[in-house]
Amino acid sequence: MIEALLLSIKIGIDPEIFSVIGIEVTWHGLFTALGVVAGVSVATYFARKQAYPEDMIYNVALFLVIGGIIGARALYVIENWSIFENDLGDIFALNTGGISVYGALMGGAVGAWTYAYITKVPNLPRGADIAGMGAIVGMAVGRLGDIINGEHFADSTSLPWGLVYTDANSPSFIQFGPNALAQHPAVAYELIGDMLIFGILVFVYLSVKRAGVTFFAFVFLYGLLRTFVSFLRLDDIVFLGLRTAQIVGIVAMPIGLAGMAQLLRTSPQEERESRAQRRRSLRAGEEPAPEQPTDA
């Protein structure tokens, strides 16, 4: 135990950067915003390669971000209702932290797909591939703020890279006190995992010429990551000894595998015919649409 304290990494940074007219700006909020910028930038880069129009790219990104913010906060509030039931105004205090990554993914997906469906964005499966790569980078950047703030609690550890939070305003310091044992840097593990997943997704995107496979690979890999990392976290147990992220991850993994298997079983000719049929259905009674972006 003494060795763990001596070798642990101490973080003594105040979660609040500054306050303006009563509004707190935190490291969590800053890196969440930077994560959005990074994720949109990555998605925009690949979307341009697919010849998507600039205005379409940014419109989809806008709806994805709006949906992601709503979903992230909504799921967090649902999971932690006891914190908010006596002060509903805190539900909207996004700057102080408290979001669910899975809520962001689900809300962002709903927002982006709703816009894409209404406006008939071409080649939706390839767009989903691109969105998945942007999302994983955005989450990785956002995790930097979580590491600084210490708002996600984890099991104690004797490893030399455990974390101890020493600032009195850190949620971990408030939770465990000044004599806390070093805890697993579970969120840092996820950040590393996110970047590894991004590398795998880029490889799949460039090497597998089948739209949608990259997206389902993202669904499977992130579900796998969160399922195992969450064993180290002290989030509430909700069912059969599992946490919310683990339940979602366990559901996501077979969906990701099934999606990849189905797409990889479909021959390129069948895929082209299926796309052509969808385009004919969409264009029925309309003027011919501009040429669709092609796969990279």
Image (spheres, grey):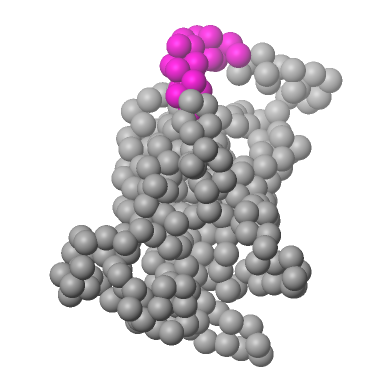
Q: Quadrant of the C terminus?
A: top left
Instruction: Tell me if residue 85 comes above or below residue 263 in the rendering.
Output: below
- The part of the image, by quadrant, that contains residue 276 is top right
Q: Which residue is drawn at 49% across and 16% down?
A: 262
Looking at the picture, does residue 198 appear above or below residue 20?
above
Instruction: Report the residue at 34% width, 48% height from top.
Output: 193
Rendered position, 80 above or below 201: below
Does the magenta stretch mainly form a helix, a strand or a loop? helix
| Residue occupying the point 76% across, 37% down | 118
User: Magenta includes 236?
Assistant: no
Residue 263 painted magenta: yes
Q: Work out which quarter of the rendered image holds the N terminus and state it.
A: bottom left
Q: What stretch is highlighted in magenta?
A: 256-274
Number of numbered callouts drawn: 0
- Choose between 44 and 135: the one closer to the eye: 135
**What x and y, as percent, mark residue 148?**
39, 72
Residue that sits furthest to the right in the current view: 285
Image-based side of 252 in relation to 160, left or right: right
- Left or right relative to 5: residue 32: right
Q: Where is residue 57 in the image (x, y as percent from the top left)?
A: 59, 47
